[in-house]
Amino acid sequence: MALPTSFDMVFAPTTRIVSVVRRFVSSLYERILEDAELSSQLALVTHELMENAVKYNIDDETSLRVSVTPQSESLSDMTVTIRTRNRATPENIRSAQRIITRVKEAQDPFLFYQELMMSSVMVPEGSGLGLARIRAETELTIDFNIDGDSIEIVAQTQLRHGGEA
Amino acid sequence: MIEVHVGELHAVAKSGEGSMTLSLVGTADTSAESALNELLGRLHGELQKTGVRVVVVDLHELEFMNSSCFKSFITWIVAVRRLPEDQHYKIRFRPNAAMHWQKRSLHAICYFGGDLVSIES
């Protein structure tokens, strides 16, 4: 296990690169965490966050930062953090803020996801399904930071004993 | 036969004896969303015309599906649910255990679909 590991990537906002990055981080996670299922979850999170960052970006740069860092000397406890950052319109920043707050506050992420699935049928775009999916289908929490017209979305999980979240 | 090849997704729907199989190969992401919506709409119409009662969705070679394409399936399930009960048909997913994301995603869609949706073991 090679720890700590982190990388930053800055890319033009095109969806064509998202699957390429998902495959890359999936291989990276598998090598570092030695857990195929968890790596698959982290790849899903990376994909969903990157697609959102690309879709709502108003700039020519979108960034992704992935870090796997030990919490103790033993390296058995680790934190995995996936961040995307992009500039967005005030309306889209408010919308992301509203959806992520609802996802965070949902007492049962799975039931919230089910409710959102139903309501998403009536919403042409911006339903927040990808963010709710992250919380319901993976072990990662989700949060955001806003700095002017820039929004950073942060997904994170703590791992114990060789990959168990 | 209905066939779509868009972005990294190749989708083919073929009818057999009393059933229909939709095979998805590759990656269903943003670039495939609109084509997948259209394909599922056409498939829904075809299933109503032919009276087929089971459609198998083969995900064996589907590497990944994003939430936008996932939503296309949700819309499809809702469309089936809105049909008169005697016209309902079942959607049965054929997963690939090696594609780990499928396990939780299919659990979520199966819960959503109730008795209309099942997963092959």
Image (cartoon, coloured by chain):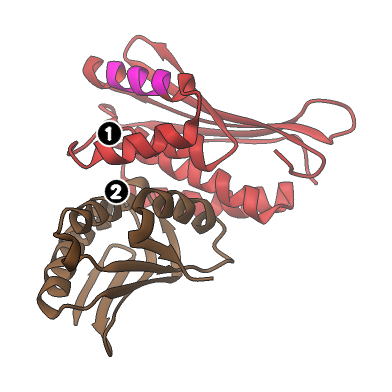
Chain colours: A red, B brown
Q: Which quadrant of the view contains residue B92? A: bottom left
Q: Is residue B82 left or right of residue A95?
A: left
Subunit bearing disc 2? B
Task: Name the residue located 57 percent from the left edge and 52 percent from the top edge.
Answer: A40
Residue furthest bottom as drawn: B17
Above or below, comparing residue B62 to residue A38 in the picture: below
Task: Please name the amino acid that badge 1 sits on.
Answer: Ser
Task: Name the residue located 29 percent from the left edge and 29 percent from the top edge.
Answer: A57
- Which label sits on residue B71? 2
Please give the residue where the numbered disc 1 appears in the rendered image. A127
Q: Position of residue A14 (x, y in %)?
A: 31, 44
Looking at the rendering, in which quadrant would you find the C terminus of chain A? top right
> Mark 2 vs mark 1: same chain?
no
Q: Which residues are magenta?
A: A94-102
Task: Please name the amino acid that badge 2 sits on.
Answer: Lys
* Crowd tier of the residue under label 1, counting other residues whose Cα lies within 10 Å: few below 14, some 14–19, many 20 or above: many
Instruction: Say how many tags the image has.
Output: 2
Q: Is residue B68 left or right of residue A19?
A: left
Q: Which quadrant of the view contains residue A102? A: top left
Q: Position of residue A163 (x, y in %)?
A: 74, 44
* Crowd tier of the residue under label 2, counting other residues whose Cα lies within 10 Å: few below 14, some 14–19, many 20 or above: many
Q: Which quadrant of the view contains residue B46? A: bottom left
Q: Are marks 2 and 1 in contact (CB under 8 Å)?
A: yes
Residue furthest right as drawn: A74
Task: Name the residue located 21 percent from the left edge and 78 percent from the top edge.
Answer: B52
Q: Position of residue A101 (x, y in %)?
A: 41, 18
